Image: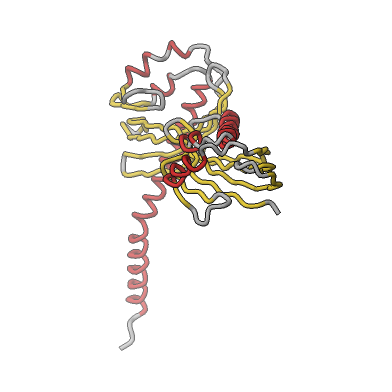
Amino acid sequence: MPIPSTRLAVLALALALGACAGESPQADAEAAKEAAKEAIWAKEQAVYAARRRADPQFYIDNASEQYVGWPPGWDAPEGLDRLRAGVSRVEGQVHEELTLEFGGIAVSGDAAVIYYTTHRTRLPTGEEVNQRFHIAHNWVREEGEWKLLGALGRSASPGYDPELAKEEIWAKEQAIFAGRSEGDMQFYVDNASEQYLGWPPGWTTPSGIDQLRSGMEQMRGLDQEELTLELDGISFSGNTAISFFSTHRTRMPTGEAVDQRFENIHVWVYENGQWSLLSSMGRPKL
């Protein structure tokens, strides 16, 4: 039996309404998330804009009375009293230069967590720096307004100055070979990581720190090596540095005259506040 056109129309309308009802909660959640993001991200940027004017009051005014934060530089989490006490200490410190980059946001009802990074190139006092931070802020909506409830920041900087690190690593490279020329491998061993693995010319396979230590006695007294070094470059990423350099050996440790050239790569890792040699490899220069 054919279905009357009126029943078809009602059925189609019911299906359409059902589909809309199924999509509505998700659409509403996305709209709410976007609205929260716009409001909170605008406040975050305004906080730093005020900071550049040495005015932390905007931060305080937009924090919940239950606020607890642990920014970089604080020894422990503290509340609004710590923020209020610091207002007078930043007067006149208007030289900060800093950029922000949005990372992400999670929103659930009246709570939100926002993640972003900052890159500071000048301190409020005017000193030039190169500092990066990861930031997580917790916001809550109180009486219709977003308030900062919790704050946590961590340094994302490598913890060293690349130019000074370059000088330090190259000084260590030269000291390693200076010790070697005197038949003394102790400096090499002392500046190698416990996880060291290397494959210098002459080794048949890559070996670790134990072979370096066992080679110390074998090298003792072999102090006639003559060799020059030339730095080709050092690159950095996070807590890792790669050193490229060339060597020209004109006398073996035993005293034999030679004309040998090598290309070398050393991988250094920044651990416990110092650079340690993690890996090494060399090859004859063609």
* Quadrant hosting residue 136: top left
* Quadrant hosting residue 234: top right
Quarter occupied by the N terminus: bottom left
Relative to 142, 234 lies left or right: right
Closest to the observer: 130 or 78?
Answer: 130
Report the residue at 33% width, 65% height from top. 18
Give coordinates of residue 114: x percent, y percent.
Answer: 40, 39
Report the residue at 47% width, 31% height from top. 274
Residue furthest to the bottom: 1
Q: Which scheme is used to colour this image of the protein?
A: secondary structure
Quarter occupied by the C terminus: bottom right
Relative to 250, 73 lies left or right: left
Give coordinates of residue 263: x percent, y percent.
Answer: 65, 48
Residue furthest to the left: 66
Give coordinates of residue 207: x percent, y percent.
Answer: 46, 51
Report whether residue 116 is seen: yes
Report the residue at 53% width, 32% height from top. 119
Closest to the observer: 156 or 89?
Answer: 156
In this figure, what is the number of numbered marks?
A: 0
Give coordinates of residue 239: x percent, y percent.
Answer: 49, 38
Q: With respect to residue 257, does 48 lie above or below?
A: above
Closest to the observer: 5 or 101?
Answer: 101
Report whether residue 239 is seen: no
Closest to the observer: 179 or 82?
Answer: 179
Report the residue at 59% width, 41% height from top. 243
